[in-house]
Amino acid sequence: MSRNAETRSVLVVNRFQVPEEGADVFRDDARAALTALSAREGFIRGRFGGSLDEPGEAILVTEWESVGTYRRSLSAYDVKMYATPLLARAVPQASAFEVNLSAAEGLITETDTDRAPGLGERERETHEPTETR
């Protein structure tokens, strides 16, 4: 296993509930979203697919060089036009994940995290202010 402290790629996972009667249009919308996202700096790869087990469930997964490149991509005009409307239809849940382990060609790579052990809060996250008198 190799360790890498430099690269903190980000997976963005969006789940959707797609009515059967709108599936073809939704797929076209997903294609347009992937086209816009894939043109942005920092984009690594993206995939869209439907569930094999649950009709009407779909997923859009994109991978980015960093959380910064992902967030900056969201402000691009073409992303606002073609991806944001689709992403707004996603099931409301956590969607951006820091990659900690990856596997390729039989090699596992572990990436150091800036999160506390156990995937806890980041040191730089703030807590609710304590009341002072």
Image (cartoon, rainbow, N blue to C red):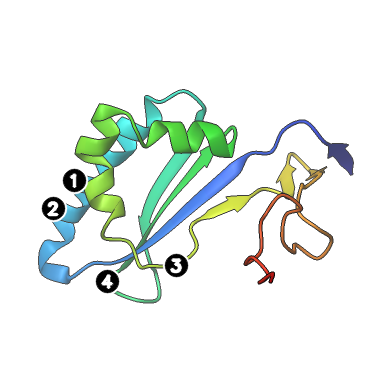
* Tag in front: 3 or 2: 3
Percent x, y of residue 104:
72, 40
Q: Which-is-in-front pick, marks 1 and 3?
A: 3
Q: Amino acid at mark 1?
A: Asp
The residues tagged by marks 3 and 2 sit, at their Cα atoms, a distance apart of 23 Å
Q: Residue at x 33, y 38 (%)?
A: 34
Classed neighbour count for the residue bearing mark 3: other residues with Cα under 10 Å, few (<14), some (14–19), many (≥20) = few
Callout 2 crowding tier (Cα within 10 Å): few <14, some 14–19, many ≥20: few
**Of callouts 3 and 2, the N-terminal one:** 2
**What residue do we see at 32% from left, 61% from top?**
90
Give the numbered dot on residue 93: 3
Look at the numbered discs 1 and 2 and tell me whether their residues touch, using CB distance below 8 Å: yes
Q: Which residue is mark 1?
A: 28
**Residue toward you, 104 or 132:** 132
Count up the numbered dots.
Answer: 4
Q: Which amino acid is tagged 2?
A: Val
